[in-house]
Amino acid sequence: LDELKDTASECSAVEPNNIMRGKLKKIGHKVYKSSKIAKKNYYDVITLFHVFEHMKHPIKELKLIKSLLKKNSQLIIEVPHASDFLLKTLNLHEFKKFTFWSEHLILHVKKSLDVFLKLSNFEVNKIFGVQRYSLANHLYWIFKKKPGGHIHWNFMRFRILEKLYEKFLSLINQNDTLIIFARKK
C-alpha cells in the first residue's frame, strides 16, 4: 500500500484481521474488512501477494474479486511455489515443517494457478517463477536447518550470483515464488 499510494489515484486493501486492519487505518490507508463490501466494477488492478494460498474457497473468492474489477483490468497473484527447490529436489524436512503450516491451505504450481484462474473465468496472461530468497538462504537451510540465511550469511550475497541462481531455478521450474498476471475479460 505504501509503495502504491503515490502512483495510484486511489488505493485500498482488504484485511480481515482486526488488529492489522486497525494498524493500516491508523497510518492512513483505506481498508475493508471483506471483499464483499468493496466497490463492484471499480478497480483497475487487484493484487494478492501471498494471500491466495490462505483462501478457504479460492474459486468463490476469485469470482468475487472478478466482480470488483473493471472490464479488461488486471489481477496479479504472488504465491509460494509448491515446486520450490528446497521442497522438490532437496526434500528438506525442516523446510517442509516451516512451509506447510496451518494457514497455508494449498501451495500451487503453474498448472494449478492456471486452472483456478480459468475456472473463475479469468484470462491468464503470464505465469512465471521468481526467486525471493538467495543462495545464501538456501545454503543456510541446508546446513543450519532453519530460515534467515539471507540475513545471517548476507556476506555471501552478490547480485550476479543471485541472478544466476534465480535463472538456474527458473530453468528447472523450482523458484520459491510464482507470479501470475490475469485479466478480467
Image (spheres, helix red, strand yellow):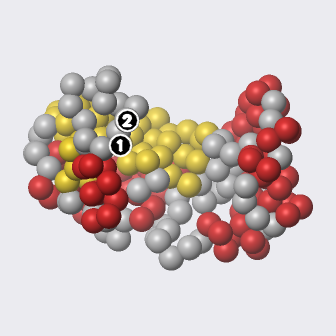
Q: Percent from the top left, x then y, of residue 32?
A: 20, 54
- Specify the quadrant that holds the C terminus: top left
Question: What residue is drawn where x is 50% and y is 42%?
Answer: 179
Looking at the rendered structure, the kind of residue marked 1 is Thr
Residue 132: x and y, percent? Answer: 63, 43
* Mark 1 neighbour class, 10 Å CA radius: few under 14, some 14 to 19, many 20 or more: some
- Front-most of residues 26 and 17: 26
Instruction: Give the SS element for disc 1.
Output: strand
User: Identity of the amino acid at label 2?
Assistant: Asp
Label number found at residue 47: 1
Q: Quadrant of the N terminus?
A: top left
The part of the image, by quadrant, that contains residue 93 is: bottom right
Question: Can I make out residue 124 in this image?
Answer: no
Residue at position x 89%, y 61% in the image: 143
Residue labelled with disc 2: 2
The residue located at (72%, 66%) in the rendering is: 95
